[in-house]
Image (cartoon, rainbow, N blue to C red):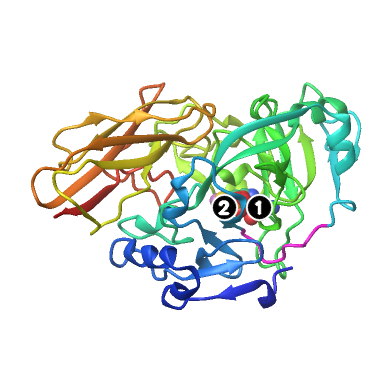
Amino acid sequence: MMTRRLILKGTIGGLAAASGGLAGSIARAALPAGTLESQTLERLAGKQPLLKRSYRPPNYETPVEYFDNVITPNDRFFVRWHLMQIPEIDASEWRLTVSGDAATQELSLSLDQLKHEFEPAEVVAVCQCSGNRRGLSDPHVPGVEWGYGAMGNARWRGVRLKDVLARAGLRKEAVEIAFDGADRPPLDATPDFQKSLPVWKALDENTLIAYEMNGAPLPHWNGHPARIVVPGWTATYWMKKVISIRALTQPLSSFWMASAYRIPKGKFPVIDRFTTQESETTTPITEMVVNSLITNLKDGQRLPARAPAVVKGLAWDGGYGIRRVDVSVNDGRTWEQADLGVDLGRYSFRPWQYVFTPRATGPMTVMARASNAQGASQTYELIFNGPGYHNNVVQRVTVEIA
Ligand SMILES: Nc1nc2c(c(=O)[nH]1)N[C@H]1C(S)=C(S)[C@@H](COP(=O)(O)O)O[C@H]1N2
Ligand SMILES: [Mo]
């Protein structure tokens, strides 16, 4: 349970003394005027200071400064919850129930059983909220006003969901696999957070029930003791503190499937479809769109003229693999290919960098644009949608050459 005792509060100014450079650089990294109301840094128990978007339920994003590493450390990983009651779970008491009308038998698994009775599996994968960058939407849309940091990349270790479903016995009539976590709404005001996946995605060998993140047990805020990991797909399906998995012969009818996390059909260049949940006009969000982030430059930052400068960042997509990243240092007039860094697999962040020597002094607008193995790329104009999903507008950072 989250109590005030678990939180150390501080504004950017207040924290400057405590954490020096970071707080100062966040103040400079302010997002475009009016997009976000607060830039408050707050420390949840076990976490470094993160940008608070809301306290009840806890929604905290990762400052851009922390993305200097291709793996996002657990104590810097963003936190997103829909419901306010988030129990601290004792791993030895946790049980995962596997049931449903499309399962031939019901299972109740302990964490020890999960760890010792199934083959372990690992994947490095980006966990990104569907609404990452919603706060940059113009016109504004309601929802958590995220900046750039509602995402992270981790090495997830656990067991394959398909192995656990096989143990329960999946009937051929199964159409969806449904998930529920231990978190609950306070009264009954908000519907319980329940999600489902199409059977084919649940059976993908990369879809895991993970109990480790970057070699450590999952932090409480990120789903201790176990969560679903759905590489390539937005984080809404990555059920945290999962306690129930059901194999269903009918599509799950839940508020969070029917009324949230849906996008207009045909508006985004996505390939994966979730047909059992489609309506005439909308479809559930599925895989992430191609995207990139410049991680080492901020608006207004000064760079010396006639000295080599570097633009660094990350690129990712829905699991097809980043093929190239192009960088422009003249507001999009010409583009040069960046060097791609370490490849931790097609679901991971891909680091990149571009080195150049600025000649003329004055403002310089830097942009980065990633493309994937499908030839898909980022957009220049926002594909506007009411919930503010899939924002992969090419970023523009204006530095000052002096
Ligand atoms: N049990 C539970 N799991 C959940 C959610 C939730 O509210 N409850 N939110 C989902 C959404 S929308 C996101 S973006 C991710 C956030 O994962 P993180 O908090 O580990 O960053 O968790 C997902 N899993
Ligand atoms: Mo999300």
What is the span of residues highlighted in magenta in the rendered image? 81-89
Q: Which residue is mark 2?
A: 77
Task: Note whether 141 is above or below 158 in the view shown.
Answer: below
Q: CA distance from mark 1 to mark 2?
A: 8 Å
**Of the pair 154 and 109, the residue shown nearer to us:** 154
Q: Residue at x 71, y 49 (%)?
A: 218
Magenta-drawn stretch, dominant element (helix, strand or loop) = loop
Disc assigned to residue 49:
none
Q: How many marks?
A: 2
Q: Quadrant of residue 29?
A: bottom left
Circle 2 packing at 10 Å, graded few (<14), some (14-19), many (20+), is many
In-image side of 105 versus 130 (left or right):
right
Task: Note whether 164 is above or below 138 in the view shown.
Answer: above
Amino acid type assigned to the residue bearing label 2 in the image: Phe
> Where's residue 187, x and y in %?
72, 70
Q: Counting residues from the N terminus, which is met first, the one under dot 1 or under dot 2? A: 2
**Of the pair 169 and 3, the residue shown nearer to us:** 3
Q: Quadrant of residue 336?
A: top left
Circle 1 packing at 10 Å, graded few (<14), some (14-19), many (20+), is many
Q: Quadrant of the N terminus?
A: bottom right
Disc assigned to residue 222:
1
Q: Is the C-beta of the residue carrying label 1 under 8 Å from the nearest atom of ligand 1?
A: yes
Q: Is residue 189 visible?
A: yes
Amino acid type assigned to the residue bearing label 1 in the image: Asn
Contact (Cβ within 8 Å) of mark 1 with mark 2: yes
Q: Is the C-beta of the residue carrying label 2 under 8 Å from the nearest atom of ligand 1?
A: yes
> Where's residue 35, x and y in %?
34, 63
Q: Residue at x 31, y 51 (%)?
A: 297
